[in-house]
Image (tube, helix red, strand yellow):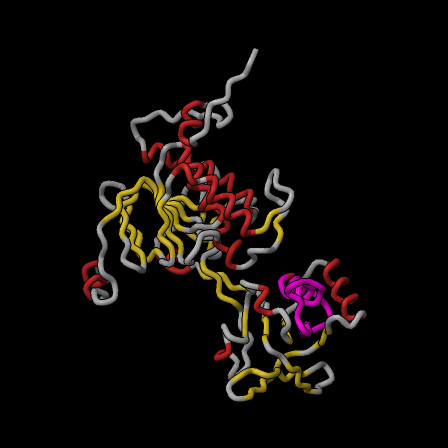
Amino acid sequence: MERQDRQAAGAEEVKLAPMIDTDALIVGAGPVGLFQVFELGLLEIKAHVVDSLAHAGGQCIELYPDKPIYDIPAVPMCTGRQLTDSLLKQIEPFGATFHLGQEVTVVEKQPDGRFLVETSKGTRFLAKTVFVAGGVGSFLPRRLKVDGLEKHEGTQLFHHVKNPAEFAGKQLVIVGGGDSALDWALHFAQDGPDRAESVVLLHRRDAFQAAPANVARMRALCEAMQMQFLVGQITGIEETEGRLTGVKVTGGDAVTRVVPLDALLVFFGLSPKLGPIADWGLALERKQIVVDTEKFETSVPGIFAVGDVNTYPGKKKLILSGFHEATLAAYGAAPLVFPDKRIPFQYTTASPKLHKLLGVDTPTFDD
């Protein structure tokens, strides 16, 4: 469908907004996208940021805001929320504009080399460069396929925990055999403000893909009668007046038992969905964007990809790797933004120019 046809067909849903000119457009406001703002800012490249979530932070905030992260250099431990807050504080001097709760739907290269970008809310950009920092795309939870269960999603059925306090004092059934299931089962079974009335951990077999130490802690809590572990699968549900009151669990002995509950937490993992990025004409490999390792540029000059969304030989999906990629991508983009300007390499410790950009005083040292 041609652009005019698309606009005409969707004219009632999306009203085109005025065009926004920008040096760089960053797609994704997770930790790597936020650090991309910082590295671009040091090179005086102004950026706008688009994210489909209603808040910055990406997976760190959406999936594990309170889970500890231990491999950020010089930070022994921080949570996803703390990391996001620190990054937002770090990029304040550069005044990036955020466009949250909207997804990039169109990316088209223009005759002058810039990119026309449109979002699901009708926001439009003309960007000299585009940075894809969208993790591995959007995440869809792998769902428990039981008749009648889906209507309880968001009220009694959950695939991730945003506010642990909501589950305090409740009867919980937690399904899964990975780290998320074990982490939350331990969290709600132990003494603390979020402790549940009861916790039943359910997995299809008596083996786990989780940290051995957590498995041992879970078994110890079961021995102490602070929680319960069942081997089996959910084959049905029980309801009273439209509310979920229990699940039918069929064990390896073929016996079906009813387990009462107030809330059902299912952690079967997440399936990545690349979404509209798959239609941008970029070279892909296993739903990831192929990049070089000099500039982290994609097969389309001017579009860069950093973080978990990209792939290259030796790729490691770590936040700290994404920070490295964002640095080189910024330097790779600078000649496109400033074609007639020499880009010197400077250290933030010693450069008065960078100190001015950051809004800090240049230190003086006594002889």
Question: Horizontally, is 137 left or right of 168 in the view?
Answer: left
Give residue 64's quadrant in the image.
bottom right
Report if residue 183 lies within the magenta region. Answer: yes
In the rendered image, the vertical position of residue 319 relative to residue 222, given as above or below? above
Residue 14, how many percent across, how many down? 25, 62
Give residue 298's quadrant in the image.
top left
- The span shown in magenta is 180-208
Report if residue 204 lies within the magenta region. Answer: yes
Q: Looking at the image, which is closer to me, 259 or 235?
A: 259
Residue 256, how many percent across, how many down? 68, 87
Q: Looking at the image, which is closer to me, 216 or 321?
A: 216
In the rendered image, the vertical position of residue 47 relative to residue 209, given as above or below? above
Quadrant occupied by the N terminus: bottom left
Q: Looking at the image, which is closer to me, 73 or 195?
A: 195
Question: Which residue is the extreme one toward the right?
Answer: 223
At x 44%, y 27%, the residue is: 355
Question: Horizontally, is 174 left or right of 287 in the view?
Answer: right
Question: Horizontally, is 324 left or right of 330 in the view?
Answer: right
